[in-house]
Image (cartoon, coloured by chain):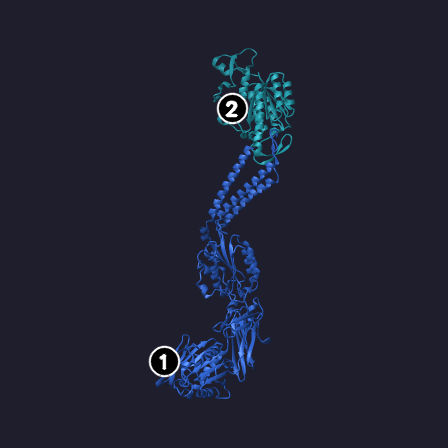
């Protein structure tokens, strides 16, 4: 598969791949190969340097090819290696099950989290996973080993939809549990009380965490492109509402825009990166945003 | 409406799909799962109802487009040219010709005709003006052109079938007259009839409906209906001694062998015979009438669907011996008496009279005015009236009286030029061998023997007939029919002064033939057909009372010429006319041509009346145009496509407007 093609792999195509590991590798390798050909070289994650071997260094890290050419023992050193603990916080509430095309928000979020975990561990970051709905459902502490990546991806593979969304309890719990400063990546549709979210973000910042929010939305949740008279059922509460799509669209879009503005404004004030992404878009944009935020943190 | 490619109409069923889809969706609002309701509010019900109404309107428009499109591809055309294209329909002036002839009484034909009329009135546009004409032998405008449907409806119960024969010609003439007063340019003649062959008189063969007038025949009744009726009838009388034997010969149409044919005389069944075979056959009855006088009766067939023609009525008179009156000079009277009283078995009663008066003439059948004294104007008038009523007047000359006093001109026979004395004797040169007077004498050598030394020269008047002439060409015998009778002028004499005729063997037969011929004519016609006019004679101002089989009585007043016509022969049966002591019974029968129920098809009638378009056997619409021609002519598909485009524009407009409203809300 050519790198150029991989870079633009659509979520609908990724959904056909079996196994999140293959999916994550496909996405990330393709993405990185693309970056080398892209104008954004300054963000290369594989920047490495050599230093002279000192006793106690792992012999496996000696670059034997350089030794063969120069007769010098040089050890490969990765910048930022194991410096960052990336907490991938994934919303698994029932509303994440919505889909207007072949990929639901939860599936898309899983692809994204898997790719981020793969990328993080590839960079020697420790990646952890927290699944929540109205409470924390599962937690995997951050580690950087490939075996941990497998564990993490297995958890994602077995993921099922939970109940309603609440930011209050689970996000504060995460902030309390993670004493060491880290990189919190929240992947959610944010369809809950925005005040709770903002409070949680404030808590993260108070605890010294960098926070990146991936706001995952179905394209229909942005456009609300319904026309008929229909009875809309809330996936989380089961409540039904009789609406005429065409006349409800404007009100929906206004309310949604107001909601999004409020989140953006709060993120701006709390120096939190906010990225809205729809499930019909390729993942590379999200990865780029992640690296950009990760890079800022390092500097 | 028909279609050249009707299979395309199946595509119109596609219009049902949106309906089904709509109905399924309409049953219940679709339930749509959605991630959250936090940005939504319920839409007011009023708005939803409005939206559904708009949806239905759009649905109807879209269905109409599909149907019209399928219709356009099916290439529609109108079956009848007379059917107007609805979107461009013009107001019409319509004349309905309603057949009331006897044949319409067969079975349910008349009821079907009433239903057809009722249907036309019900389906007609309120802006059209309609006229109703009833016709059989003659046509009558029952309702003039009007938009008043109530007036037309009110006329229906009064419609009755008659016993008259059909004649379409006066009906179409009247329709044309009515349409000349029409208000609308679009004009139509609708014919409701059994389209019986008999209705197409020779006049109709030359008739064509005026250009621009649409013709629509509506046929009612069954085809090939068989009917019992009398096709021909003859009554002959033969004298056998003192009795008269009457023979009735009738040709009839029977439905089956064994159908009964009855002879009824007076009110008594006299005889009955079975038909030998089905179809046309003949039957003969004989009856001996010992007494002189008038006899009435009828022949009857068994009942059938059309009863009105199952009887043939007749009236006949068994006369006593004809009575001859001679008003003559002595010598002429001698020879006349000799001629009529030669034997005891003489067929005539002879009487010599001195004066000519109405009362004297009334008792006789023939009067010989032979070399008589001078005739006054009153006597000439009496002779004229006698002839009018069927009497025979025989005029002959002689030396007693100046011939100029005979009043030949008043009797209409001719102009008297003067007396001719021939130097050499004249002979009979030529006679009308076919005439009853000379039929038995023609070719006999007796005709050439009498010599005529003197005779009067008469120039025949127009309408007079020279029955014989002398060898020099001058008229010998002249006849002029006057009224029901005749005036015969013999230009020489019945005595020996002017001719030796009375001495020859020709004399007696000739005189008897003249008297017999004149007597035969005294028998008034007694057989008429429904629709005929019966001539009646009498003194000017006198009135006949005529009673009909329905016991109605009509008065017929004689005009200044002493003539009147009784025209009310509407029903078959026995009629009686009475004027003073004179009684004149006669019989009326239906026209046997009307009884033959052979009918034409609508296509034949259309072709005949519109003017030779199409095949005779085709239906009217097809007679005028084949389907393809009609489709080419009407090009209805263009209108369908235009309608589709119009609906499409309307649909776009409405949908766009809806969208704008939705966006605005």
Q: Determine the secondary structure under disc 1.
A: loop
Q: Identify the residue position indicated by label 2 in the image.
A: A31
Query: Few, some or many C-alpha atoms within 10 Å of disc 2 (few <14, some 14-19, many ≥20)?
Result: many
* Quarter of the image where one finds residue A263: top right
- Asked if residue B91 shows in the view, the reply is yes
| B482 relative position to B582: left or right | left
Q: Position of residue B310 (x, y in %)?
A: 56, 70
Q: Colour of chain B?
A: blue
| Whole-number angstrom distance, CA of label 1 to CA of label 2 | 144 Å
Which of the chains bears the disc numbered 2?
A
Q: Position of residue B569 (x, y in %)?
A: 53, 69
Q: Which mark is residue B473?
A: 1
Q: Colour of chain A?
A: cyan
Q: Which callout, 1 or 2, points to the residue nearer the camera?
A: 1
**Quadrant where the C terminus of chain B is found in the figure:** top right
Q: Position of residue B38 (x, y in %)?
A: 61, 29
């Amino acid at each position: 598969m050519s790198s150029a093609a991989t870079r633009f792999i659509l979520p609908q195509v990724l959904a056909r791949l079996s196994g999140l590991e293959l999916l994550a590798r496909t996405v990330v390798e393709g993405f990185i190969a693309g970056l080398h050909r892209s104008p954004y070289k300054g963000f290369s994650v594989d920047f490495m340097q050599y230093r002279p071997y000192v006793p106690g260094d792992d012999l496996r890290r000696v670059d034997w090819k350089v030794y063969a050419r120069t007769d010098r023992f040089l050890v490969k050193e990765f910048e930022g290696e194991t410096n960052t603990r990336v907490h991938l916080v994934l919303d698994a509430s029932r509303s994440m099950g919505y889909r207007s095309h072949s990929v639901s928000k939860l599936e898309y979020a899983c692809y994204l989290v898997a790719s981020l975990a793969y990328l993080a561990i590839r960079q020697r970051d420790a990646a952890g996973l927290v699944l929540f709905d109205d409470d924390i459902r599962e937690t995997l502490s951050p580690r950087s080993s490939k075996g941990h990546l497998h564990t993490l991806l297995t958890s994602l593979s077995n993921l099922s939809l939970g109940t309603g969304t609440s930011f209050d309890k689970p996000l504060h719990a995460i902030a309390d549990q993670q004493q060491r400063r880290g990189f919190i990546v929240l992947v959610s549709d944010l369809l809950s009380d925005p005040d709770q979210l903002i409070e949680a973000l404030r808590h993260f910042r108070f605890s010294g965490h960098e926070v990146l929010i991936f706001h995952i939305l179905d394209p229909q949740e942005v456009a609300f492109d319904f026309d008929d008279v229909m009875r809309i059922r809330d996936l989380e509460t089961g409540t039904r509402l009789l609406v005429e799509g065409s006349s409800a669209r404007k009100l929906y879009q206004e309310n949604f825009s107001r909601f999004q503005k409020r989140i953006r404004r709060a993120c701006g004030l709390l120096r939190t990166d906010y990225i809205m992404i729809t499930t019909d878009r390729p993942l590379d944009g999200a990865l780029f945003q992640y690296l950009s935020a990760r890079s800022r943190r390092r500097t | 409406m028909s279609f050249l490619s009707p299979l395309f109409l199946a595509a119109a069923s596609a219009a049902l799909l949106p309906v089904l889809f709509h109905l399924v969706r309409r049953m219940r609002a679709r339930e749509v799962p959605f991630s959250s309701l936090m940005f939504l509010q319920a839409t007011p019900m009023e708005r939803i109802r409005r939206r559904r109404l708009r949806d239905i309107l759009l649905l109807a428009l879209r269905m109409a487009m599909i149907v019209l499109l399928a219709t356009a591809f099916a290439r529609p055309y109108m079956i009848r040219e007379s059917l107007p294209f609805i979107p461009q329909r013009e107001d019409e002036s319509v004349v309905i010709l309603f057949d009331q002839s006897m044949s319409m009484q067969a079975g349910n034909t008349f009821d079907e005709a009433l239903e057809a009329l009722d249907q036309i009135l019900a389906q007609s546009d309120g802006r059209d003006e309609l006229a109703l004409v009833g016709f059989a032998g003659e046509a009558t405008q029952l309702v003039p052109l009007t938009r008043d449907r109530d007036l037309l409806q009110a006329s229906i119960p009064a419609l009755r079938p008659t016993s008259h024969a059909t004649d379409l010609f006066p009906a179409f003439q009247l329709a044309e007259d009515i349409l000349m007063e029409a208000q609308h340019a679009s004009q139509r003649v609708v014919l409701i009839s059994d389209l019986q062959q008999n209705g197409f008189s020779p006049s109709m063969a030359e008739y064509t409906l005026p250009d621009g007038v649409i013709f629509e025949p509506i046929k009612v009744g069954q085809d090939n209906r068989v009917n019992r009726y009398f096709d021909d009838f003859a009554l002959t009388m033969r004298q056998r001694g003192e009795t008269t034997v009457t023979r009735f010969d009738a040709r009839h149409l029977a439905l089956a062998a064994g159908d009964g044919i009855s002879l009824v005389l007076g009110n008594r069944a006299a005889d009955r015979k079975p038909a030998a075979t089905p179809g046309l056959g003949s039957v003969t009855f004989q009856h001996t009438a010992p007494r002189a006088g008038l006899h009435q009766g009828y022949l009857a067939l068994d009942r059938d669907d059309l009863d009105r023609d199952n009887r043939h009525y007749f009236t006949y008179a068994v006369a006593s011996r004809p009575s001859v009156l001679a008003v003559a000079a002595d010598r002429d009277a001698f020879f006349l008496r000799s001629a009529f009283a030669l034997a005891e078995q003489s067929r005539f009663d002879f009487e010599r009279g001195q004066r000519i008066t109405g009362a004297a003439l009334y008792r006789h059948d023939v009067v010989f005015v032979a070399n008589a004294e001078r005739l006054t104007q009153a006597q000439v008038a009496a002779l004229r009236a006698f002839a009018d009523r069927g009497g025979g007047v025989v005029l002959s000359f002689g030396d007693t009286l100046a011939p100029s006093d005979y009043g030949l001109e008043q009797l209409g026979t001719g102009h008297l030029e003067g007396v001719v004395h021939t130097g050499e004797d004249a002979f009979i040169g030529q006679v009308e061998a076919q005439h009853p007077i000379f039929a038995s004498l023609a070719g006999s050598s007796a005709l050439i023997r009498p010599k005529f030394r003197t005779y009067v020269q008469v120039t025949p008047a127009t309408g007079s007939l020279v029955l014989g002439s002398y060898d020099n060409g001058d008229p010998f015998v002249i006849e002029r029919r006057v009224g029901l009778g005749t005036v015969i002028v013999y230009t020489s004499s019945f005595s020996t002064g002017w001719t030796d005729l009375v001495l020859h063997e020709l004399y007696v037969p000739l005189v008897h033939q003249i008297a017999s011929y004149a007597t035969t004519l005294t028998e008034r016609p007694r057989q008429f057909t429904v629709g005929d006019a019966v001539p009646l004679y009498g003194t000017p101002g006198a009135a006949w009372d005529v009673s009909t089989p329905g016991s109605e009585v009509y008065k017929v007043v004689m005009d200044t010429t002493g003539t009147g016509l009784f025209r009310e022969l509407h029903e078959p049966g026995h009629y009686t006319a009475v004027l003073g002591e004179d009684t004149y019974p006669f019989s009326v029968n239906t026209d046997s041509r009307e009884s033959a129920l052979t009918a034409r098809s609508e296509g034949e009638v259309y072709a005949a009346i519109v003017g030779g378009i199409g095949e005779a056997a085709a239906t009217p619409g097809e007679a005028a145009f084949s389907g393809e021609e009609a489709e080419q002519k009407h090009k209805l598909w263009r209108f369908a496509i235009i309608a589709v485009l119009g609906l499409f524009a309307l649909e776009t407009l409405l949908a766009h407007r809806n969208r704008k409203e939705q966006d605005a809300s």
